[in-house]
Image: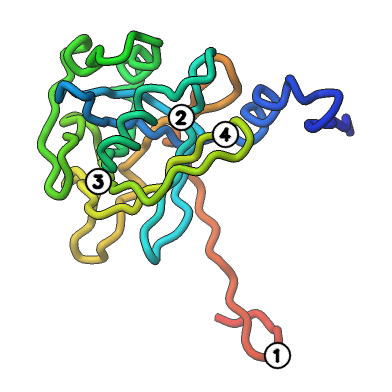
Amino acid sequence: MTELDLLGEHADRAYPILAGLVTPRPIAWVTTLNEDGSVNAAPFSFFNVFGDDPPLVIFAPGDRDDGSPKDTARNCERTGEFVVNLVDESLAEVMNRTSATVPYGVSETEREKLETAASSSISPPRIAAAPAALECKLHSIQLIGTNRLVLGIVHRVQVRNEFFDPATLRVRGDLFHPVGRMSVPNWYCRTGDLFEMVRPKYDETGSESG
């Protein structure tokens, strides 16, 4: 095994090492409102859901090279609202294009001609073509070192009909295949190759049952 000291000798390599090992990571394609009301869209792969009571998501937009917050973080702090749009393969290329650094106030949805749709509980719209979207209100922004963590409570979920089973109230995992982030700088993965493992159940004696 190779041992790496991320607080010492290898501190300057912490990002590529961790981003290469902790994979695949889901992608939060976040839409927020700029000060002029235009829509900002940017992807982040330091993202996940962290609880259900309340429904909690966290993403880390990082900072610009000069240490100032990125547009998404500024908009979240100012408005207290954001949408996490999930990304399938059909949207991967345009999602990647919106990761480019542009001056504050430039609307990626206008530049990329991305159609948006109104959210039901917050002001920022969702990306209309996204297979699912989480409408979030800001819980807090936490700074831990140079990490900027945006915590949001999910108020509404929008899911394309074909990806949701109304009888079981479950997402159709056999049909819903978002893309995932792999090693930096440029690797992604598809999620269509699935396998199933049923969680074991044990009785009070510790013996496997059923």
Q: Around disc 1, counting alpha carbons within 10 Å, would you say few (fewer than 14), some (14 to 19), or many (20 or more)?
A: few
Looking at this view, is 69 or 168 the one in front? 69
Q: Nearer the viewer, residue 35 or 204?
A: 35
Residue 100, position in %: x, y?
A: 39, 11
Mark positioned earlier in the residue sequence (1 or 2): 2
Q: Amino acid at mark 1?
A: Thr
Dot 2 amino acid type: Pro
Q: Earlier in the sequence, mark 2 or mark 4?
A: 2
Please tell me in which quadrant of the rendered image residue 150 appears: top left
Q: Eyeballing the image, is 96 above or below 158?
A: above
Cα distance in 3D space between marks 1 and 2: 47 Å
- The quadrant holding residue 175 is top left
Q: Amino acid at mark 4?
A: Asn
Outermost residue to the bottom: 204
Secondary structure found at label 2: loop
Which label belongs to residue 61?
A: 2
Mark carried by residue 147: 4
Where does label 3 land, which residue?
A: 135
User: Which comes sooner in the sequence, label 4 or label 1?
Assistant: 4
Q: Are marks 1 and 2 in contact (CB under 8 Å)?
A: no
CA neighbours of label 4 inside 10 A, class few (<14), some (14 to 19), many (20+): few
Query: Mark 1 — residue?
Result: 205
